[in-house]
Image: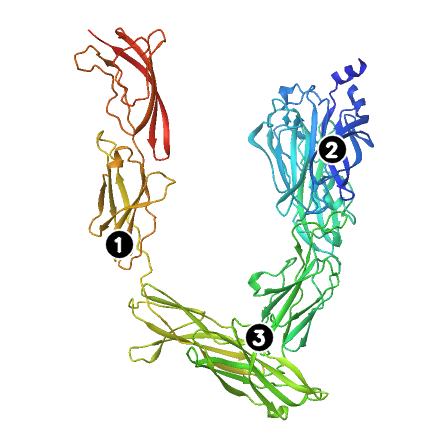
Amino acid sequence: MVLLSIKASATHYRAGEIIYEQLTERRYRITAITYTDPRSRADISTEELTISFGDGTSETVKRTSRVFLSNIIVQNIYTTTHEYRIDGSYLINIIDQNRVDGIVNINLGNSQYIAFYVESLLKINQSIGPNRSPILTKPPIDNGCLNRRYYHNPSAYDPDGDSLVFSLIPPKQAMGQEVPNYETPKSSNDIFKIDPINGQLEWDAPILAGIYNIAILIREYRKNILVGYVVRDMQITINNCINQPPVVQNIANGCVVVGDTIQRIISAADPDNFQKVSLRGYGGPFAVERKATYSPNPAIGLGSINTLFNWSPSCSHIRKSPWQIIFEAKDDETSNPAVNQNSFFVQVIAPPILNVKTTQINNGFELTWNNDTCGLAGRYKVYRKIDSSNWQPAHCETGIPASTGFQLIHTVNTLNNPTANVFYDNNGGSGLSPLVTYCYRVIAEYPPRSASGQVIYGDFSESIASEEVCAKIVLSTPMITKASVISTHKTNGKTDIAFIKPEFLDTLHYQAPYQVAVKRNSSKGINFTTIATKDYTSFANINDEVLQDSMLNTSDSQYVYVIDFYATVSGAKTLVGTSPDATTIRTGIYSTDRTNILSWNVNVPWHNDTFIVYRKNTSNVFDSIGFSLHTSYSDTNLTNNQTYCYFIRSSGFYESFSVKKATFNFSQEICGTPIDTVKPCAPALSILPPCSTANEYRNYLSWTPIPQCAMDVVSYKVFFKPMENDPYQELITLPNTQLNYWDMRTEQKQSIAGCYYVAGVDSAGNISNNTNEVCVDNCPFYQIPNVFTPNGDLSNDTLHPFPYRFVSAINMVIYNRWGNEVYSTTDIDINWNGTDKKTGNACPDGVYYYICEVKETYLDGVKTRNLQGTIQIIRN
């Protein structure tokens, strides 16, 4: 009986939450934190608390810590460990009796018999890696002032760097059960909200003093996947304050590179100058290793105060999302101290990769760099650009923006090989051009890591870009300067290939004799074939050369050429290097209405800056008709069904300190015949349904051509479907002089509903798209007379409905005045002669009642309409 008495007066729970921390694969440390009123007799029961683990098991946990925050608020901490058997989602929760009494927005203030309940979602999934719940560094007990804007921030951070999303939900009294009669705290400006990104709660402004409880749901996301949440049940006491709250000055957001220090001067002032003000900081940076500091801590002063924030973060603090820091100022008013706060964000980023170097190996560069100083990079990304960008990252700018012209060419993964810091760039095997300046930058990317340092699934964060390093391949092999089609034929096509001699070679190592081997491959082939070789007795004798390749199918194939350069090393023939690939220009053609569209592709080590388009004229001679800076050209205003033939000439060059050579190359000849493939526009359609006339069952269609794109329409096709989800069927084809159509098919008497569209057909047979669909619905009509005279005079002897339409079925029942059924039918025409269906006798004069279920046909199917009314029988 004593225990029951304690529970009956249990009015002690104020606030609380549950957090968890992963210890091993499925073993977790679980901590429940509650805030209670130590004055209550029921508070003695807080020596232990039952925690349900969400897997069907629970444990009664002894209190591990008890801290008095004031004479009316005590913090209780309960910590235990639990191991889950399998992966899954687990709702950890606590429930206990009861809340403090007088909570304004719960059960009209009668809250002393309402249970206290909070929960946290734990999701165990090996594919997303280790996980720890968000940590809330600001206690969930706070004070505000009547008629003054109130702010609060739970100062939450995620040790794993997951993204947090904040929202407000009603407090609960049990799993899935909200507290009764919960009301969102009332405000003078209808503002009670929380910022979903930074967790800032705003209440503008409280209009009734008292105790309030709210619940904050803090969800954590990892790459847009929900990985858990914590629900905090929080208590706010609104007082009738006589003093004004202090003001914390705005604090600029910032960033800091690991190895550097970020500082901010935090200032607060109280409008009531005689008040003593204290200033304290909250947030993740104060809770991690190598934590942030502020001095003095706390800052206390009269009227106005300052404190200096300092943080020199370590590599473990690098993450994609910024860290939030909150500073709260409180005055020393004895009865009702006023509080205010402000916050700022700090982004911790990785320093740039150092000492990027290039070393030429054959016709490529080997890039090396120092490993990241943190030793935590998950991958390096190598970017390349032709010529210098003259770009320098802005302060704390990470990554390499596309606007710099750099392109990602390779990623070096280091999770399984932390010391990997080498990449060989030979342009994917095609070789780098010796006559081009290549510039490189490298960035490191850091995977998100758990609080214990394990890599977890999530978004990588980028370092600052390295310094730019530029280099040029020394021309130590011949370089192709021409790959040009000079004859288009399926079996006897020809190309010209030209190359320039190498500029430099270590002839002490690579000795004579020398050999140049020209090799060819089709663009779809795998292996190169040697088509020509030339030997030289000395390096000085090597000259620029031009040769011709014949017996080719230049009509259908594109060809790729490379040059292998050999020397003698220790008496053996040795490959010095291979030139970059060079392809012939391959042109394709697409013919449409009065237009031939040409496009071409080419892959060469020089820079093509202009493409000139040639077309065969009526004298059978090719003339230039235009040029393009890109790899396409449209030849317009042509005559349909007439053949036109073309080829492309490229104009390009190598440019370097020692060499500047122009090169001109031709594509194969190709022909195309313009045909009208452009669909005409659909005409604008309108339909006049016959609903205004009872006995008319036809739809009148009319349409108006669109002048801009229907000049060559020769006919129109009318399409119809009876239901919205049916396929269209063609009804009729009409000449272009007819711009209307009466749909008077016999089916129309059952239903005029359906959708139509009219398509224009041009002289080439192109049919316009279905862009003018117009749908018509039925207008059903069914009405029952309210009197008939079954007296045998052959006039109005039988009950029939008035003329009806679009009715598929009925179900009618007629009753006498005592509620007895006298007639029923499913005949749409009813056909009642006034006799009782059971006795066969004539029903007496009088009023009869009916209920009639009418099935009416519409565009989207059959619908039921219920009719009811009276029918009077008059015999005399």
Q: Quadrant of the N terminus?
A: top right
Three-letter residue code for mark 2 = Phe
Tell me which numbered mark, 2 or 3, is placed earlier along the sequence. 2
Tell me which numbered mark, 1 or 2, is placed earlier along the sequence. 2
Three-letter residue code for mark 1 = Pro
10 Å crowding of disc 2: few (<14), some (14-19), many (20+): many
Give the side of residue 5 with respect to residue 539, left or right: right
Label 2's element? Answer: loop
Residue 67 is at least partly visible in this image: yes
Q: At 66% across and 54% down in the image, what residue appears? A: 460
Task: Where is residue 417? Give x, y as percent.
Answer: 74, 61
Three-letter residue code for mark 3 = Asn
Q: Nearer the viewer, mark 2 or mark 3?
A: 3
Give the side of residue 606 with respect to residue 180, left or right: left
Q: Residue 71 falls in which quadrant of the image? A: top right
> 48 or 105, which is in the foreground?
48
Determine which residue is flagged by label 2. Answer: 53
Residue 338 is at least partly visible in this image: no
User: How far separated are the C-alphas under marks 2 and 3?
Assistant: 64 Å
> 441 or 798, which is in the foreground?
798
Determine which residue is flagged by label 3. Answer: 527
Task: Where is residue 695? Give x, y as percent.
Answer: 21, 30
Q: Quadrant of the C terminus?
A: top left
Determine which residue is flagged by label 1. Answer: 707
Label 3's element? Answer: loop
User: How far separated are the C-alphas under marks 1 and 3?
Assistant: 57 Å
Count of marks, rendered view: 3
Q: Are marks 1 and 2 in contact (CB under 8 Å)?
A: no
Image height of 136 relative to 474, above or below: above
Tell me which numbered mark, 1 or 3, is placed earlier along the sequence. 3
